[in-house]
Image: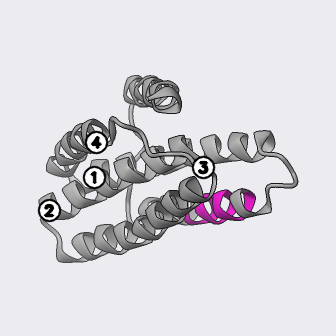
Amino acid sequence: MRVNHVGEVCAQALYNAQALTARDADARLRFEAAGREETDHLAWTRERLHQLRDRPSLLNPLWYAGSFGIGWIAGRTSLRWSLGFVVETERQVEAHLAGHLERLPMADHASRAIVKRMQEDEARHADQAEEAGGVPLPRLAQWMMRAASKVMTSTAHKI
């Protein structure tokens, strides 16, 4: 659950940065709305960590700062690229959550409910960004995002 919490810390940073850099008022509202939903995810995962007697990642400030920078860069590109970044991010998160659901014990109903709801919300965010005009990112960018995610998830699992 710590890794999912870190993902939500990163989502906060990404959406905050993209909302701040959005030149289009409608896009800003979309980023802010998605960010509010990610705030719910952050609270759910934090509470679940507490229930499991676990702690958040000690590197959360670093994850937030790095993700904010990435979101700022994405937001400073065109709206179509920025939305494409959201699509790719949320699709990768959706896949991560699907894998987490497979590994979670069937008896852990509380964690499964949280992860399933988050997965549904992330899929909707990706669909909305795509419908709003997000374009597919180059394969190199997709690969770099996956690599950064792998570093984050493996490190957050431990620290």
Q: Position of residue 3 (x, y in %)?
A: 52, 41
Instruction: Answer whether residue 114 is magenta in the image.
Output: yes
Residue under circle 3?
94
Please check the rendered image and state whether residue 110 is part of the magenta-colored stretch, yes or no.
Answer: no
Q: Residues within 10 Å of mark 4 (few under 14, many from 20)?
A: many
Q: Residue at x 71, y 39 (%)?
A: 99
Residue 78, position as x, y percentages in the image: 20, 51
Mark 4 to mark 3: distance in Å?
A: 18 Å
Q: Quadrant of residue 57?
A: top left
Q: Is residue 3 above or below residue 35?
A: above
Q: Which residue is mark 1?
A: 13
Majority secondary structure of magenta residues? helix
Residue located 35% across and 66% down the image = 35
The image's mark for residue 67 is 4
Name which quarter of the figure residue 124 lies in: bottom right
Residue beneath label 2, please? 20
Q: Which residues are magenta?
A: 112-121
Gap in angstroms between the C-alphas marked 4 and 1:
6 Å
Q: Earlier in the sequence, mark 2 or mark 4?
A: 2
Q: Nearer the viewer, mark 2 or mark 4?
A: 4
Task: Choose the circle earlier in sequence order: 1 or 2.
Answer: 1
